[in-house]
Image: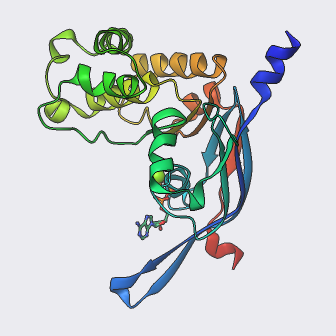
């Protein structure tokens, strides 16, 4: 039991002195500070919720954690539980191949909007991350079916490409795709923004299950009820200019 608790408390993310400044090259090189000296950790079983007004850099922070954006300063370290050697990886200077491997095995990201791939069915869009981790096609599709059924995506849509789906249908495909891989670290950018109350409740349940499995979640939730239902800790962000 104690060993289990220790496992659950294990730190997976360590961020120190993180800063992000955008330089607008086509606007005469204007520099836009967004994130300043951000420090936090996230451990197994934690759901850290980024809060703060629009424009304070919540989505920017998630993109830095997924290495979509390069941090301007500071350190982002992720624990690669699948690594044979040194488990802590410094993301800010990791080579591209290492970043791709981390995205396959360690860190998942549910962006606010689904980037639909033409001609690929919803079921295969969802199954893909699990297949990339070595599961068979059948196994991955079976798991995708379970998730899509729980998220109430009508069966008639499963074999169709999601490009023409409604906003809420696409969002549910996106959530299923984010959850299926079982990544120990999961980033969520407003995953319930286009969902009705019933489906929001399903997402809350899925998030709680992910936490119980010992995954670490870092998310943005504009819906206060969803945030209160899943957050174990808040990370308030302030406008960076206010610190200048
Ligand atoms: N690629 C970019 N180039 C230039 N500026 C950017 C870029 N991405 C974000 N920004 C700026 O960074 C600031 C923070 O944006 P971000 O999207 O992170 O805010 P947010 O807290 O997620 O807001 P919201 O709650 O509205 O989603 C904004 O002023 C935005 O214009
Ligand atoms: Mg945002």
| Relative depth, front residue between 1 and 104 | 104
Tell me what residue is drawn at x 45 percent, y 55 percent. 96
At a point 18% along the width and 24% down the height, the residue shown is 121
User: Residue 26: which quarter of the image?
Assistant: bottom left
Q: Residue furthest right?
A: 2
At horizontal 74% and vertical 45% (from top left) the residue drawn is: 41
Q: Quadrant of residue 24?
A: bottom left
Q: Is residue 83 left or right of residue 204?
A: right
Taking depth in this image into account, of 5 and 111 the one nearest to the observer is: 5
Q: How is the image coloured?
A: rainbow
Task: Left or right? Give the position of 214 relative to 57.
Answer: right
Above or below, 136 relative to 182: above
Q: Is residue 45 visible?
A: yes
Instruction: Pick whichever, 168 or 83, lies toward us.
Output: 83
Q: Is residue 59 above or below residue 107?
A: below
In the picture provided, is 192 more to the left or to the right than 214? left
Number of marks in the image?
A: 0
Q: Residue furthest front?
A: 85
Residue 65: x %, y % from top left? 56, 51
Q: Is residue 141 left or right of residue 30?
A: left
Q: How far from the left and from the top, in percent, is residue 11? A: 75, 36
Q: Residue at x 77, y 31 (%)?
A: 10
Q: Quarter of the image containing the N terminus? A: top right
Q: Quadrant of the C terminus?
A: bottom right
Q: Give the quarter of the image for residue 224.
A: top right
Residue 69, position as x, y percentages in the image: 47, 61
Is residue 189 shown to the viewer in this render?
A: no
Residue 73: x and y in percent read 64, 70
């Amino acid at each position: 039991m104690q060993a289990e608790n220790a496992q659950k408390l294990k730190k997976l993310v360590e961020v120190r002195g993180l800063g992000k400044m955008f330089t607008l090259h086509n606007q005469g090189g204007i520099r836009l500070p967004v994130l300043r000296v951000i420090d936090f950790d996230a451990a197994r079983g934690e759901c850290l919720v980024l809060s703060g007004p629009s424009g304070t850099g919540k989505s920017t922070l998630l993109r830095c954690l997924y290495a979509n954006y390069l941090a301007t300063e500071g350190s982002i370290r992720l624990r690669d539980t699948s690594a044979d050697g040194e488990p802590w990886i410094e993301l800010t200077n990791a080579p591209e191949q290492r970043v791709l491997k981390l995205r396959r095995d360690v860190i998942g990201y549910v962006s606010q909007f689904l980037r639909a791939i033409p001609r690929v069915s919803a079921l295969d869009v969802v199954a893909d991350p699990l297949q990339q981790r070595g599961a068979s096609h059948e196994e991955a599709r079976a798991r995708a079916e379970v998730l899509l059924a729980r998220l109430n995506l009508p069966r008639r849509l499963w074999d169709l490409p999601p490009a023409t789906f409604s906003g809420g249908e696409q969002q549910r495909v996106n959530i299923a795709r984010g959850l299926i891989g079982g990544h120990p670290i999961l980033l969520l950018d407003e995953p319930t923004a286009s969902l009705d109350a019933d489906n929001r409740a399903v997402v809350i349940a899925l998030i709680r299950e992910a936490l119980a499995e010992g995954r670490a979640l870092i998310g943005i939730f504009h819906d206060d009820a969803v945030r209160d239902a899943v957050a174990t800790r808040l990370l308030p962000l302030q406008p960076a200019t206010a610190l200048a």
